[in-house]
Image (cartoon, grey):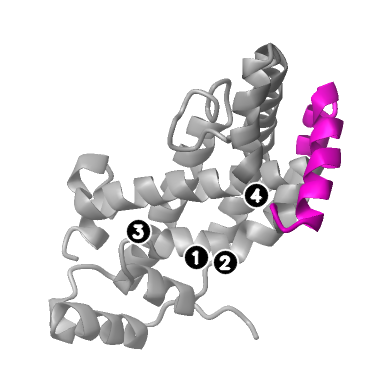
Amino acid sequence: MQRRKFTSATLLVLAAGRWGTAGASPFSETDAASGVRAALERGAVSAVGLLGRTDGFLGNPKVRIPLPGFLNDAASLLRATGQQKRVDALITAMNRAAESAVPEAKAVLVNTVKNLSVEDARHLVTGGDNSVTQFFADKTRVPLGERFLPIVTRATERVSLAAKYNAVAGKAAAFGLLRGDDANIERYVTGKALDGLYLMIGEEERKIRQDPIGTGSAILKKVFGGL
């Protein structure tokens, strides 16, 4: 099915559903399309900029990647036996791997914005506080995971403890102590990197919705200011 452009009828429906009457819509169809795309792109660029740099993950408690489940508890025992440097090296490598992978997201996210459909736009303008974030997660998690994984793999394989992690995690999974991607360090870090990315996009989305004037963007103020 071909992507449809915004039409006057679409904006009337949108305005009537959100602002009460069709005539109350404060913006044109061109404004609506531009505003939604601006919000999407701002969230994407901001999140990539914050995370895709040194200490973007490691230095941010909101997204810092720990060892999963019982392995995080086991790390305390390793530290108590003089293995702190090795454990810390693995955790640092995991977070550095995520930081290295995140810049790959920018092109995918921006391209997703450009391909926004009228149905997507309607949902995003009238959606809840996390509709932009959920849109990105639904559209990009799989392709970004495929891009992130080889980058994460190259970064983590430089640390000898990573292979030992996979060996121990594999045995833990057999006993039901770890599940799914947590049993493989590369897939675990990839998943956590994506979680962190969407978390930061979500924070930017909330800022836009709560204070569109504060963004300094005329189009965001115009489109989201009346919500």
Q: Position of residue 219 (x, y in %)?
A: 29, 53
The kind of residue on which mark 1 rests is: Phe
Q: Earlier in the sequence, mark 3 or mark 2?
A: 3
Q: Nearer the viewer, residue 166 or 140?
A: 166
Q: Position of residue 201 (x, y in %)?
A: 44, 48
Tell me, yes or no, whether the two marked residues, 1 and 3, touch with CB atoms within 8 Å: no
Residue in the image at 30% along x and 73% along y: 126
Would you name the residue on which mark 3 appears? 35
Query: Secondary structure under badge 1?
Result: helix
Residue in the image at 69% along x and 36% along y: 101
In the rendered image, the vertical position of residue 145 relative to residue 27, given as above or below: above
The kind of residue on which mark 3 rests is: Gly
Tell me, yes or no, whether the two marked residues, 2 and 1, touch with CB atoms within 8 Å: yes
Q: From the viewer's perspective, is the residue at label 1 or at label 3 nearer?
A: 1
Quarter occupied by residue 13: bottom left
Would you name the residue on which mark 4 appears? 191
Q: From the viewer's perspective, is the residue at label 2 or at label 4 nearer?
A: 4
Q: Earlier in the sequence, mark 2 or mark 4?
A: 2
Would you name the residue on which mark 2 appears? 138
Tell me, yes or no, whether the two marked residues, 2 and 4, touch with CB atoms within 8 Å: no
Q: Position of residue 29 (x, y in %)?
A: 34, 72
